[in-house]
Amino acid sequence: VHVVESGGGLVQPGGSPTLFCAASGTIFSIGDMAWDRQTPGNRRELGALRTSSGSTNYGHSVQDRFTISRSNAENTVYLQMNNLKPEDAAIYYCNARGFQSADESYESWGQGTQVTVSS
């Protein structure tokens, strides 16, 4: 299962970019789709997670500013980021977990997309 992210780049403080992620390949089902981020100081933390049933979980530092949404039919997940702060600068990684068959699970990560916050 391949996971590809897009939508990063240079954003001004206060900006509202959207990250996009698509999973493809032999997919029987996808359970959770999530965004993690790795900061310049190499701290890895949860950005947001959304289950196939619609439950969400957000990292403390992004709650109330970021929104995760997904299309189960299209195996895609979005991360709407609002009111971006300099500390949101990071490499954002998309993750998908599920099954390729009735008894073969997978967990796949994308290559990451860089978000830089600067005026």
Image (spheres, rainbow, N blue to C red):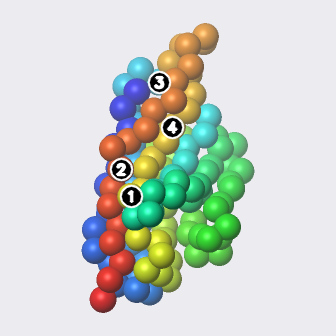
The one of 58 and 29 positioned closer to us in this rendering = 58
Single out the mark in the foreground, 2 or 4.
Answer: 2
- Give the labeled residue for mark 4: 96
Judging from the image, what secondary structure is the residue with disc 1 in? strand
Q: For the point 44% across and 63% down, which residue is it? A: 41
The three-letter code of the residue at mark 1 reads Ile
Identify the mark nearer the N-term, 1 or 2.
Answer: 1
The one of 109 and 66 positioned closer to us in this rendering = 109
Pointer 1 and pointer 4: residues touching (CB < 8 Å)?
no
Q: Which mark is residue 35?
A: none
Q: For the point 65% across and 44% down, which residue is it? A: 51
- Give the labeled residue for mark 3: 27
- Give the labeled residue for mark 1: 91
Q: For the point 62% across and 49% down, which residue is it? A: 50
Instruction: Tell me the crowding category of disc 2: few under 14, some 14 to 19, or many 20 or more residues within 10 angstroms, Cα based.
Output: many
Image location of residue 14, percent across then percent down = 44, 86
Pointer 2 and pointer 4: residues touching (CB < 8 Å)?
no
- From mark 1 to mark 2, how far is it between C-alphas? 6 Å
Left or right? Give the position of 25 relative to 88. Answer: left
